[in-house]
Amino acid sequence: MRIAKGLVDVGVLALVAFLFVPATAYAAGPTGAAYAASGKDTSNKSCIEAYERVQTLREQGALGDARAAAIACSADTCPKVLAKECATWLDQIAQSQPTVVLGATAPDGKDLTNVRVSVDGKPLASELGARALAIDPGAHKLRFESDEHGAIHLDVVVREGEKNRRIVAAFMPKREATPTPVANVPSPSDEGLPLGFWIVGGLGVAGVGVGATFEALGLLQAGELEACKPSCDRGEVDAMSMKLLVGDIAVGAGTTALVGALIIALTDSDPGRDSEPDAEASTVSVAPAIGPGFLGVVGAF
């Protein structure tokens, strides 16, 4: 079928050359005949090129470009044989080329006209009207762009011979930017524990730690003095005793401070108070008390 069609085309072109070239030669004389035979008649040459281009473009599905070529070779300035066949093709292309009717709606559902449309990256319409637009068959990417509502991309497949297909882009309301949540780092007061708890508790932990250290040093030295009993150096014995005494006092003071911190936490009546407590209420004083046969901590909160 394709071979037969090619033979027909060749025959048409040969007939054009037979009819057109002699007529030009007789009208123009020897010089005109040579000019036409040499192919320098640009009008005739462009008609033949357009004639051949119509067939190629139709096979490729580029019906828009094929229609433009068919219009060119069906002009009155072209040979009648070519013009007649190109006119026939022009009617066939008009029947085969699909058309679309484009539309767009605002977020409230109202029709929009001030919308630009491009197909496969090429401009198709500067605004939306009520008339159908010709488009080549196949898969296309449509972009609807509005200055007020942004842009929408649609993937569509248009089939040959499809007419007045309606394609509508529905613009949606713009999303408002969601504020980024700020991490809230809780302070001691946010957790329901007053400042005095942390101060007294810290002193208690420090006291117990210091006391345990002195106790360990005293006990270590006592073990070393076991070898020299009962004639150990008096100075070393006194140093050992002092370490043990300081350790006992520090451990006792630390323990008392921890108990005090616990009491402060249990008796606090306003866990949600401001993180900057009153200066007078946050004054804390702790001091060890040593007496005959006892040791302890004296504090004011």
Image: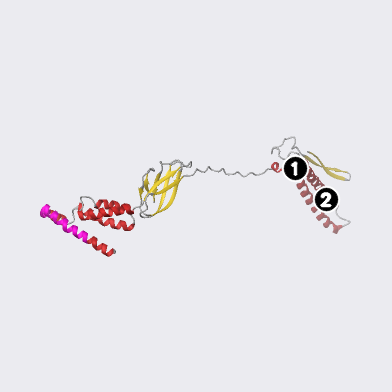
Q: Nearer the viewer, residue 49 or 265?
A: 49
Q: Which labelled disc corresponds to residue 50? A: none
Magenta-colored segment: predominant secondary structure? helix
Residue 197's mark?
Answer: 1
Contact between labelled residues 2 and 1, with CB atoms less than 8 Å apart? no
SS class, disc 1: helix
- Residue 187: image quadrant is top right
Farthest residue, direction left: 29
Q: Position of residue 17 (x, y in %)?
A: 18, 58
The quadrant of the image that shows the N terminus is: bottom left
Looking at numbered disc 2 in the image, what kind of residue is underneath it? Leu
Q: CA distance from mark 1 to mark 2?
A: 29 Å
Residue 189 within the segment the image draws in magenta: no
The quadrant in which the C terminus is found is top right
Magenta-drawn segment: 11-31
- The residue that disc 2 covers is 244
In the rendered view, does 122 fall on the left or right side of 76? right
- Number of other residues with Cα within 10 Å of mark 2, as a class: few under 14, some 14 to 19, many 20 or more: many
Sequence order check, earlier mark of 1 and 2: 1
Say if 286 sits above or below 122 in the image. Answer: above
Which element type, helix, strand or loop, lies under badge 2? helix
Q: Position of residue 299 (x, y in %)?
A: 80, 40
- The amino acid type found where label 1 is placed reads Phe
